[in-house]
Image (tube, rainbow, N blue to C red):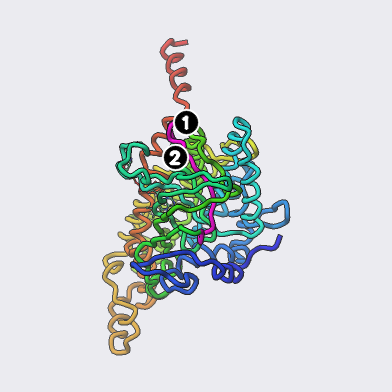
Amino acid sequence: MVLRTSAKYLEDLKAQSPEIYLQGSRVDDRSTHPAFQSTITAWGTFLYDSSTDPELQEHVLADGLKGKTHRFWYIPSSQQELVESFEATWRIAEYSPSGSYTRLGRDQLAALRVVTRSIDADRGTEYGARLEAFVQRFQDQMLMTAAAMTDPKGHRQRRPREQEDPDAYLRIVDRTGDGIVVRGAKAHVAGAVAAEEIIVLPGRALHRDEEDYAVAFAVPVDAAGLKLISRDGHRAPSAESAPVSHRDMVIDSLLVFDNVVVPTERVFMAGETEYAGTVASLFPDLIRQGYLATDVGRISGYLGAALLVAEANGISAASHVRAKLAEMAKLRSIIYGLGVASSHLGKVLDPGVAVPDPVLTAAGQQFAREAQYTCLRHMIDLAGAGIVTMPAVADSQNPSLAPYVEKYFKGATAGPDRIRALRLAHDLAVSPYAAWWSAETTNRSGSAAAEVLQMLREYDFAHHERLARRLAAAR
Ligand SMILES: Cc1cc2nc3c(=O)[nH]c(=O)nc-3n(C[C@H](O)[C@H](O)[C@H](O)COP(=O)(O)OP(=O)(O)OC[C@H]3O[C@@H](n4cnc5c(N)ncnc54)[C@H](O)[C@@H]3O)c2cc1C
């Protein structure tokens, strides 16, 4: 198989004309718009380039049926392949945490592969064959996708049909001989401005009378009636001031489906309410393993920055510093272990889709959420106040100011080296990019409450009850 290059991806982006809005105005060409360059790198070119990157290549390439393929376009079918996918994800996340999220599309298709098989078996439908045709194209062309699952939801404690506005959840408003017409929206869709296809899943379990909301499909990002209202544009800072975020900040969008026609061959669920809950929990089970890998990669960055600022401040040998570094290494190792264990303990579901252990991934998410805050706090502590107060790049470039900046920012290392270390720490811990990650980590994979529900559903409490009865009976 010919692996897609970043040049081909960029060329193909120009062939589509999605209706994207940024700060109230229509964007003519997303591929050249300055606000989207970082997204296009993290959610596009970086991934394609990773296939040939000497450090990443061996981790991100898999042996597919048609030759070498990238793991983010390859659906794991065994526990071992889950481990390899975890490895590929955290390796990518070390350089591009946002880029590691582009496997969302693959994981959506994996969940749909399981669910369409069940629907077809029970109902005699043909969703599976349609999905496989789409998966083939996704894999052969290495299409870049965005994952649309979260509905706007209106009043959170009301069901879709109880909402004042029935469009608060994306729904089918018409069924034609050739397909369906959908109206509503999907919120917070990361990377959509850099995607070629949008894959849509139902966002929750549904009751029998909610069949219009049980809908899954894929549409090109420039489908008629699909509008992307992109969040306030990220004006990419310079590489010097923001060594990571200038190329890793990803824009999310509100996707408005204003009577979008979805042709039959792109519809993977339309009305089968009893399967909506399965796909809405299977997809998070798959992607939570990816989130663990992202956190392993992110903590690699925090740990590296902590080492650099400690060296720059001349405190590397201090015992409290060593204790903090050890705790960061411990937390990263535990998250890594949970990701690997959840893969080894995963199950292979019909028709051959490997799914990580749902309890270990949900528990891991809860653990990783707190752990990454602890790691950030340690890194901020070791950096000192300069992490937020350092002079601007322009000050270092002004010949009359540079000597002062260098003289007074000198630590155990030269002024420019210490400032470089502080800028990295700043970018990872206190920049707008860091704030995005903080909100993302708290709210991703549904909410923390959704993880608790999943653990309550999947954990083998009966085992403990049996054990306790036996212990209580003193036999
Ligand atoms: C940066 C970022 C990127 C994202 N990218 C994507 C993406 O690419 N695709 C995608 O589909 N989604 C994406 N999400 C959405 C993410 O999955 C959601 O944040 C998540 O599903 C939560 O939904 P919500 O934001 O509507 O919050 P809510 O569901 O409103 O949750 C807010 C709070 O309300 C509570 N709550 C909600 N409902 C109830 C209820 N019925 N009863 C009691 N309490 C309730 C929750 O537990 C939580 O504490 C992204 C989110 C972020 C922050």
Q: Position of residue 76 (x, y in %)?
A: 62, 46
**Amino acid of disc 1:** Glu
Tell me if I can see residue 337 in this picture: no
Give whichever of 2, 255 is nearer the camera.
Answer: 255
Judged from the image, the secondary structure of the residue bearing numbered disc 2 is: helix
Q: Quadrant of residue 426?
A: bottom left
Asked if labels 2 and 1 touch by Cβ distance under 8 angstroms, the answer is yes
Tell me if I can see residue 408 in this picture: yes
Circle 2 sits on which residue? 362
- Image vertical order of residue 188 relative to residue 311, above or below: above
Q: Position of residue 319 (x, y in %)?
A: 35, 56
66 vs 148, left or right, is right
460 vs 405, left or right, is right
Residue 33, numbered label: none
Badge 2 density bin: few <14, some 14–19, many ≥20, Cα 10 Å: many
- Image vertical order of residue 417 relative to residue 345, above or below: below
Circle 1 sits on which residue? 458
User: Magenta span covers which residues?
Assistant: 206-223
Badge 1 density bin: few <14, some 14–19, many ≥20, Cα 10 Å: some
Rounded to the nearest angstrom, the CA distance separating label 1 from label 2 is 10 Å
Judged from the image, the secondary structure of the residue bearing numbered disc 1 is: helix
Give whichever of 34, 128 is nearer the camera.
Answer: 128
**Amino acid of disc 2:** Ala
Q: Quadrant of residue 341?
A: top right
- Image vertical order of residue 332 relative to residue 280, above or below: below
Q: Position of residue 221 (x, y in %)?
A: 51, 59
* Residue name at image x 31 percent, y 84 percent: 402
Disc nearer the start of the sequence (1/2): 2
Residue 88 is a magenta residue? no
Q: Position of residue 300 (x, y in %)?
A: 46, 57
